[in-house]
Amino acid sequence: MGDEAALRVLVVGESWIKHTVHLKGFDSFQTTEYEEGAGVFLGALAASGFEVTYLRAHEISGRFPRTREEIDRFDVVLISDVGANSFLLADETFLRSERTVNRLALLADYVQRGGGLVMVGGYMSFSGIDGRARYKMSPLASVLPVEMLDHDDRVEVPEGVVPSVEVPGHEVLGGTPAQWPILLGYNRLVAKPGSTVVARVGEDPLL
């Protein structure tokens, strides 16, 4: 949606806060850690010439675009491992019962107008663990090229599985090596009619 040479990418998610209770006999104590999982990916994007803005999961309520003007500053929005509630339950709505913009409806409108959208699989992507990611019930369901399940969509593969590339020359791969790394799990989805499946795990679409 921009005229600049470098594609402007908004990366959302891939961060979490871990709260641990340590039990040591009679005594216990608690620790809290903040972690991010996007470092290597963000570095690769920047090294490839993309203009990257990173929005951590806990920043969505306050910083994710609320207007067409704000979201149109980006050419691509990439969501990774953060559920629909983080977009739908802004502080105004969840804490103060106030009306506010539906950020996923705004994002769906952005896609329908030509903006790029990538959803990366994870425990809180698509339907997600225990169905808690909840994107199937959101406005994004209409613009994703897949049908999501009504329940937990995880396929755990602890022994590892290597995806098969169906369309090795597809432009979305951008020179990705033919040999892909082993996956330990993925989200089970169903390709919508007319969509192109670039890579699979068994019969399941992966990309």
Image (spheres, rainbow, N blue to C red):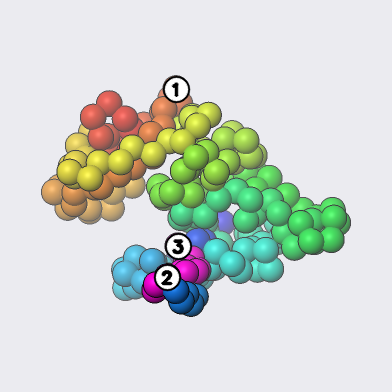
Q: Amino acid at mark 3?
A: Glu
Q: Amino acid at mark 2?
A: Leu
Q: Residue at x 54, y 68 (%)?
A: 55
Q: Is residue 131 left or right of residue 200?
A: right
Q: Earlier in the sequence, mark 3 or mark 1?
A: 3
Which label number is shown at residue 193? Answer: 1
Q: Earlier in the sequence, mark 2 or mark 1?
A: 2
Chain part drawn in magenta: 14-25
Q: Position of residue 2 (x, y in %)?
A: 55, 62
Residue denoted by label 2: 23
Report if residue 23 lies within the magenta region.
yes
Residue 198, quarter of picture = top left
Marks 2 and 3: CB-CB under 8 Å?
A: no
Are the two marked residues, 2 and 1, in contact with CB atoms closer than 8 angstroms? no
Overall secondary structure of the magenta section: strand
Report helix, strand or loop for mark 3: loop
Quick one: SS at disc 1? loop
- Comparing marks 2 and 1, which lies closer to the viewer? 2
Q: Position of residue 39 (x, y in %)?
A: 36, 71
